[in-house]
Amino acid sequence: MPKLYTIFSHGKPFCTFYVGLPKQAFAAYMNGKVLKSAESSAALGEFAYEQLREAMRNGIFRPGDPVRERKVCEWLNISRTPVREAIRRLENEGQLTHKLHCGVVVSSIDRKGVTELYALREILEGAAAAAAARNATPAQIAGMQRILNSSARTKSVAEIASLNHQFHSAIHQAADNQHLLKTLGSVRESLVLVGKSTLVLPARPAQVESEHKAILDMISRGNAARAEKAMRSHIRLALKNRFLLQEQEGEGLLNFPDVPYPVPGNSAARKKVSMGR
């Protein structure tokens, strides 16, 4: 779901913007309804940071892609200072890096690194599912079921991916373990580096729906051991599909068009802003 950010000065709002809007709504919003006040560099820096992270998460920027400061400014219609701050922040987090003769690029992670990341994720997600089976309230279980119901009704990959994120977050919250929640958050941040969601694979949404149902069934029954087993199986299959997606993209078998960026002053004819690939 989109998040509304409002920055206050002396008790009064002076800068408001959304993060996580669908690209159509974002395009319209960027053409006159967002960032009515650009006085806060910190607010704009946070905005640029969130949009860049979401672009990497959605596969718009892929590992190795250059991220040009000027092009990002054109895309977001903001000045260079907040963009520079956002890029520096992402570099410090390891999500962007400097590459010889290329400048700033999206950090890459090799096959071994992906395997290690998913191995850690399997352990943590499994532990969260087991804890959720022990600790989830009826209201939390009902909330998870509503998420699955919404996912089953939509055909939009973007919406399914968002609901997938919500489902896992609901399990993490139901686990009721703040240290586990913090560690899972760190792993999720690292997952940005592996590329777009595997839900773009044609068969994957139906598989995920079935896997999620099995996980929730065990959580609702209070069976911690089986909930953990179902979740760990789910993450192992996610890794298998991650490699499948990488292989197919490498062979040119998938053709997912870039998301068109909004161009300042031309909302009717939305054009692609090349990021220097």
Image: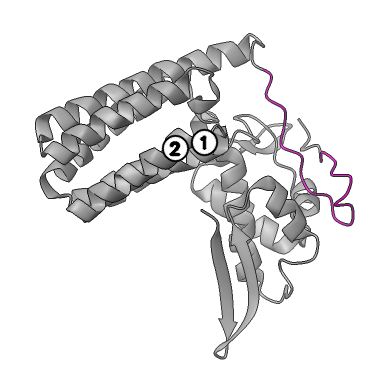
Check disc 2: other Cα within 10 Å, few if <14, some if 14-19, many if 20+. Answer: many
Task: In the rendered view, tell whether residue 31 sits above or below residue 124.
Answer: below
Q: Tell me what residue is drawn at x 31 percent, y 43 percent.
A: 145
Q: Which residue is label 2 attached to? A: 151
Give the amino acid type for the residue marked by disc 1 in the picture: Thr
Task: In the rendered view, tell whether residue 12 sits above or below residue 26.
Answer: below
Tag shown at residue 25: none
Nearer the observer, 161 or 58:
161
Q: Tell me what residue is drawn at x 84 percent, y 50 percent.
A: 263
Residue 127 position by quadrant: top left
Q: Which residues are magenta?
A: 255-273
Q: Tell me what residue is drawn at x 70 percent, y 41 percent.
A: 67
Going by the image, does 3 lie left or right of 258? left
Q: Tell me what residue is drawn at x 68 percent, y 46 percent.
A: 23
Can I make out residue 145 in this image?
yes
Residue 48 at x, y percent in the picture: 64, 56
Numbered circles on residues, count: 2
Residue 35 at x, y percent in the picture: 71, 68
Asked whether the beta carbons under mark 1 and mark 2 sit within 8 Å of each other, the answer is: yes
Nearer the observer, 13 or 275:
13
Residue 5 at x, y percent in the picture: 56, 68
Q: Is residue 262 magenta?
A: yes
Can I make out residue 130 in this image?
no
Residue 257 position by quadrant: top right
Tag shown at residue 154: 1
Residue 44 at x, y percent in the picture: 65, 65
Secondary structure category for the residue under label 2: helix
